[in-house]
Image (cartoon, grey):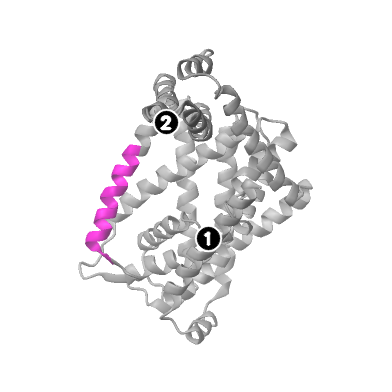
Amino acid sequence: MLRNNKAILTLIAGLLVSGIALYLTFRNIPLHELAEYFNTVNYWWVIPAMAVVLMSFLIRVVRWQLLLLPIKKTEFWSAFHPLMIGFMLNCLLPARVGELARPAIFYKKEGVSFAKVLATVGAERVFDIIMLLLFFVVVLTTVEISPTLDLTFGDYHLNKATLEMIGVTTVKLAFALIACIILVSAEKSRTIIIRTILRLPDLVFFATRAFKEKVRERVCTKLISIIEGFAAGLGMLKDPKKVGLCLALTFLVWSLAGVSHYVMAFGCPGIEISFLEMYAAMIILCFFISLPSVPGFWGLWEAGGVFGLLIFGVPAKEAAGFTLTNHVIQMAPVIIVGLVSSVITGANISQVVHRADVEHGAVGRGIQMEVNPGMDTDEVNGEYFKDR
């Protein structure tokens, strides 16, 4: 019941955010002009754009095979189908449930620990975030932005100074992320972090023992679960060569993502910008869709895409037309291939989602069983770290 309530609240929050984003994006764009623009698009460019999208997902499969290698040597198609079904569910269902469905499918087909496979998905996201942050810094330092730029989005203004500030902040976040990865990956520093988390409730000296133990059980153990999950995923890449190969594959994934956007621009009138400018717009779009939204990122995708293109002088109507068209092109092949994969594997989507929820809950309970709320802090530390 609690998880169902969380899913409903997530969907409501996503609907609100997506609705506001759609309103702010299209409030000044006449819909009849937008409809006329769609008639001018050369849809033959959809074919190469979709082909590049699918190519990027093939590389994602190879990267996931590499991450899975310490757990189990996996055939290409055994990794391909769960990955595509997971991304399809992210497009169709709220709360990015596909991230949990993928390890659930792999667990069912390959009999591998759900928690370990989930850790590889977390490691994927770390590589994606690092690469996007690096790309964002590189693009901001190489793309020329007009000093007279002043765009409004609701009550917010975007100008060159704002983008430069975002760039500096991004660099700081990148270094902070790398530092956190190092600290979480190293066993000694991770042990210190976890012990510190377990002792945090004791800082509330005026609270009762029962309250402290409840906080330790409901908050601290969940934080530990997240830390251990990332550590498990990153711990599978102790070989520097594998880390380098994963970074190279991640570079190809996001390079092809930019190419697919740029290729589709050839078929859309009024989108006359360079590859780097298109890549910058795509990264801005990625930052937007990281916020809660409805399934498929509708609303935030359009807001981020239009906002990014306006920076480089693309008129609002053309920016909206291209962004909507490109959104469908980016989503359609993922949904189609994911549905085909679910048919080939015989995966029942409702059962997969339920299994993902059950297995994810079991992972959390596993951590809570390790950290017994009935012990005092010193006993907990000794129990938790006795085998470390």
Q: Give the residue type that dot 1 points to.
A: Gly
Residue at the (29%, 43%) spot, across then down: 172
Residue at the (54%, 51%) spot, across then down: 56
Q: CA distance from mark 2 to mark 1?
A: 36 Å
Residue 299 magenta-drawn?
Answer: no
Can you give x and y, in whole percent of width and height, for residue 268 in the image?
Answer: 48, 74
Residue 70 visible in the picture: no
Q: Is residue 222 left or right of residue 360?
A: left
Can you give x and y, in whole percent of width and height, for residue 186 in the image?
Answer: 42, 23
Residue at the (59%, 36%) spot, across then down: 118
Looking at the image, residue 354 lies above or below residue 230:
below
Residue 329 visible in the picture: yes
Q: Secondary structure at mark 1?
A: helix
Span shown in magenta: 158-176
The answer to the question of whether label 2 and label 1 lie on touching residues, with beta carbons closer than 8 A, is no
Residue at the (37%, 47%) spot, across then down: 133
Q: Is residue 91 left or right of residue 139?
A: right
Can you give x and y, in whole percent of width and height, for residue 122 in the image?
Answer: 52, 38
Residue at image mark 2:
207
Q: Which mark is residue 14?
A: 1
Viewer-side label of 2, 1: 2
Can you give x and y, in whole percent of width and height, for residue 136 in the image?
Answer: 35, 52
Mark 1 surroundings: few (<14), some (14-19) or many (≥20) residues within 10 A: many
Mark 2 surroundings: few (<14), some (14-19) or many (≥20) residues within 10 A: few
